[in-house]
Amino acid sequence: MWDTGKFVSKDPYQDIALVAPYAVNWQIKQSPAGADSAVPTDLVKLLRIVRASGYRGYLPIETLAPSDKSYDPFAVVPPFLKQVREAIAQTA
């Protein structure tokens, strides 16, 4: 299972592409560098990698809570899900 929030490197998308053919499941996070990063995941780039790998399963998402604990999943999850769905549509 590839957790896209654990690729803390100079080019996380290159690293994700290297392991993508071995994925049996994905977990798409809001940032490729995890909760400590403000850099958002380039969802179109990520979905192109997922599609090129031949993966055909579910794409679970995970939103990231800020360190100040003011996380409201009802405010955060729907917009992120919409972004993921738009990226899926753009890469179809």
Image: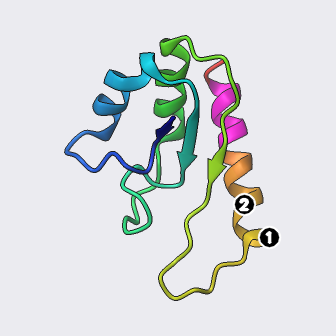
For residue 77, the mark is 2
At 61% across and 22% down in the image, what residue appears?
91
Query: Quick check: 41 above or below 68?
Result: above
Residue 17 lies, in percent from the top left, at: 36, 24
4 left or right of 54 in image: left
Chain part drawn in magenta = 84-90
What secondary structure prevails in the magenta region?
Answer: helix
Asked which colour scheme the image uses, the reply is rainbow
At 37% across and 64% down in the image, what residue appears?
37
Label 1 environment density (alpha carbons within 10 Å; few <14, some 14–19, many ≥20): few
At 37% across and 31% down in the image, what residue appears?
16
Q: Amino acid at mark 2?
A: Val
Label 2 environment density (alpha carbons within 10 Å; few <14, some 14–19, many ≥20): some
Query: Quick check: 57 above or below 53?
Result: below
Was residue 14 drawn as part of the magenta stretch in this picture? no
Residue at mark 1 to residue at mark 2: CA–CA distance: 6 Å
Kindly identify which residue carries mark 1: 74
Query: Quick check: 34 above or below 4?
Result: below
Quarter in which the C terminus is drawn: top right
- Contact between marks 1 and 2 (CB within 8 A): the answer is yes
Residue 82 lies, in percent from the top left, at: 74, 47
